[in-house]
């Protein structure tokens, strides 16, 4: 049982490049989330999904897009990376509305 | 909107001693949940303890317990008999009821347990 798996674990981008972060969960969870973690700011919600085919904006959605075409996958895209997007990105999932979140191990992204 | 504040960026404790991490939050909601997550150097986010706001009894998980003061909007974490493996960043988090499990996190407290 892998839980929540994030791909890749590390990535370095140049300003203006694009990339997609993949999150996969094998727990049949309905809800999925993307957070970013920055020093001194805790984790902030970027986008989330309450089911296959649905997405919604979180606290800091600008510069990111997401898709949930399959229940088990939640993709986070950066169309034109900026240095301000240098961060550690966490994916999480939960079974239902008030259930605790299961987190992936994070992706460290550096934009130069 | 909800806010969560952890006013102690760093703390340290000697092994086997007790330490308390502070957390305050601001909300107009009456039904909500509060959490403490632990993030060791491995970066994995680990749920430590959870408290439902409607429960007056403080939650306890082995060496971890909370002091939940709803009127004061305070939610502190007490770690008893501290162990070296407790060294980690600790995050306090708030979840509004029926919000789709969306968490609002505090800034974090880096706890170091010294031998």
Image (cartoon, rainbow, N blue to C red):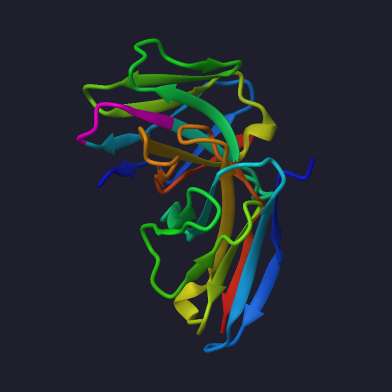
Is A29 drawn above or below residue B22 in the view shown? below
Q: Check the image and report above or below for B56 versus A89.
A: above
Numbered circles on residues, count: 0
Q: Quadrant of residue B76?
A: top left
The answer to whether residue A65 is left or right of residue B32 is right
| Res B99 → quadrant | top left
Quarter that holds the C terminus of chain B = top right
The answer to whether B46 appears left or right of A34 in the picture is right
Horizontal relation, residue A45 to residue A69: left or right = left
A26 magenta-colored: no
Q: Nearer the viewer, residue A54 or A102?
A: A54
Residue at image point 66% right, 64% down: A22
Name the residue at 36% across, 27% down.
B75
Q: Toward the viewer: A10 or B9?
A: A10
User: Which range of residues does the magenta coloring cover?
Assistant: B28-34
Residue A15 location in percent, x, y?
53, 88
Q: Is residue A55 visible?
A: yes
Residue found at x 58% / y 87%: A17
Image position of B65 with respect to A76: above or below: above
Find residue A91 and report its horizontal and vertical position in percent.
58, 54
The vertical placement of B98 against B56, above or below, is below
Image position, residue A70 (x, y; %) = 63, 57
Q: For residue A21, what is the image quadrant?
A: bottom right
Q: Residue, x 55% and y 53% (percent of image)?
A: A52
Q: Is residue B115 visible?
A: no
List the single residue furthest toward the top.
Answer: B57
Query: Residue B33 at x, y = what percent?
Result: 39, 29
């Amino acid at each position: 049982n892998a839980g929540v798996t994030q791909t890749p674990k590390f990535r370095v981008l140049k300003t203006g490049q694009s990339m997609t972060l993949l999150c996969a969960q094998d727990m049949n969870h309905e809800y999925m989330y993307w957070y970013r973690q920055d020093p001194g700011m805790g984790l902030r919600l970027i986008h989330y999904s309450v089911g296959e085919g649905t997405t919604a904006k979180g606290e800091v959605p600008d510069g990111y897009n997401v898709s949930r075409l399959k229940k088990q996958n939640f993709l986070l895209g950066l169309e034109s990376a900026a240095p301000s997007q240098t961060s550690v990105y966490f994916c999480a999932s939960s079974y239902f509305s008030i259930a605790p979140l299961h987190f992936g191990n994070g992706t460290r992204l550096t934009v130069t | 909107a909800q806010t969560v504040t952890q006013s102690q960026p760093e703390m340290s404790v000697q092994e086997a001693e007790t330490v308390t991490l502070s957390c305050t939050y601001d909300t107009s909601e009456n039904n909500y949940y509060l959490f403490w997550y632990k993030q060791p150097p491995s970066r994995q986010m680990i749920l430590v303890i959870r408290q439902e706001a409607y429960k007056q009894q403080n939650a306890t998980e082995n060496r971890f317990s909370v002091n939940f003061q709803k009127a004061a909007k305070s939610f502190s974490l007490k770690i008893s008999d501290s162990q070296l493996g407790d060294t980690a960043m600790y995050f306090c988090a708030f979840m509004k009821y029926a919000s789709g499990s969306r968490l609002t996190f505090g800034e974090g407290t880096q706890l170091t347990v010294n031998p």
